Image (cartoon, rainbow, N blue to C red):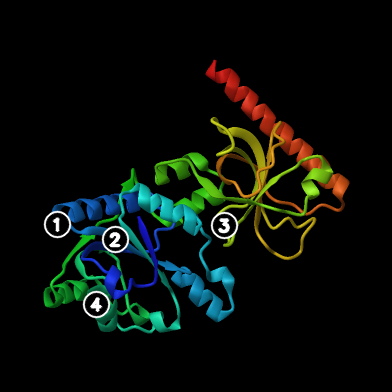
Amino acid sequence: MKVFRGLPNAAARAPCALTIGNFDGVHLGHQALLARVRAAASRLELEAAVMTFEPHPREFFARKAGDLSRAPARIANLRDKLQSLSDNGIDRVIVEHFSDSFAALTPQEFTEKVLVEGLHVKWLMVGDDFCYGARRAGNVQMLLEAGQKYGFHVETLPTVMNGSTRISSSAVRAALGEGDFLHAEALLGHPYAISGHVIHGQKLGRTLGFPTLNLRVPHRPALSGIFIVQVHGLSEQPLPAVASLGVRPTVDDSGRVLLEVHVFDFAQNCYGKQVRVEFLQKIRNEEKYIDLPTLTAAIDRDAAIARDFFAKRATDRI
């Protein structure tokens, strides 16, 4: 899969079947849409393409307003989103930098500069509530008219349901925020996980007797707290672990989000390795403790809960 930061240059452009969206989480609704794009691309002998945005448009406007509470929490980082798009058969992804100039494009300018000239769109699929252009002035009807004028076909995909629940990124965020990983999995079509490269931390966990693998989380995640997890990428089988995802209020006042994972009975050097942390169950919310001994005691209790979970799971599988 080819990934472009912004519109491809003239030599790299190719006629494509395209869909546009944030695709946070690439849930089952997204996957249904991507399958339609992949099928159309194959039928018409085009490349299957996705245009997505970084940062999320709502995050961009929240930063401009100085109120990050209005920005949506992220289900997935960009690495995981791109991997999911690749897994769904997409040939090329355009990661468009969402900026003042991009936000100011009128629907007509978006159609001409982005869809027609920039991407050579021949077939386009969007959700039935899709809006585009400055102040979200463009709608599906305007796209249909533009398609007739410029020679590309437009289709819409109705809302995808899971029983009586609309499958949406908001629904996934809500499930993750509540620690309901079974519901999140039902919406995503796979267990929830975060991947990344192991980075150096403060080494505090090692001092406390709980060495951790640290993964940077660049955006506000859709969940926080202490979790039972398993780690993929360090051995042939996933390894049992306990993890903290949050801002570590007892030891750090920077507000940076970090995923810290203590893998049980594991002592290898993992710096630089790419791992995937799969979330299994929430233990509790993140707390601020009065001192390090109190923090250590809490970690010890969390680790014991997680070890009991894995011991019971192993027994149940016998």
Q: Amino acid at mark 2?
A: Ala
- For this orientation, the residue located farthest to the front is 11
Q: CA distance from mark 2 to mark 4?
A: 15 Å
Q: Amino acid at mark 3?
A: Pro
273 horizontally vs 94: left or right:
right
| Coordinates of residue 294 in the picture (x, y in percent) | 85, 46
Would residue 124 be visible to someone looking at this image?
Answer: no
Residue where numbered disc 3 is placed: 221
Residue where numbered disc 1 is placed: 44
Q: Amino acid at mark 1?
A: Leu
Q: Amino acid at mark 4?
A: Glu
The earlier-in-sequence mark between 4 and 1 is: 1
The circle on residue 49 is 2
Q: CA distance from mark 1 to mark 3?
A: 38 Å
Q: For the residue labelled by badge 4, is the local secondary structure a helix, a strand or a loop? A: helix
The earlier-in-sequence mark between 1 and 3 is: 1
Give the number of marks: 4
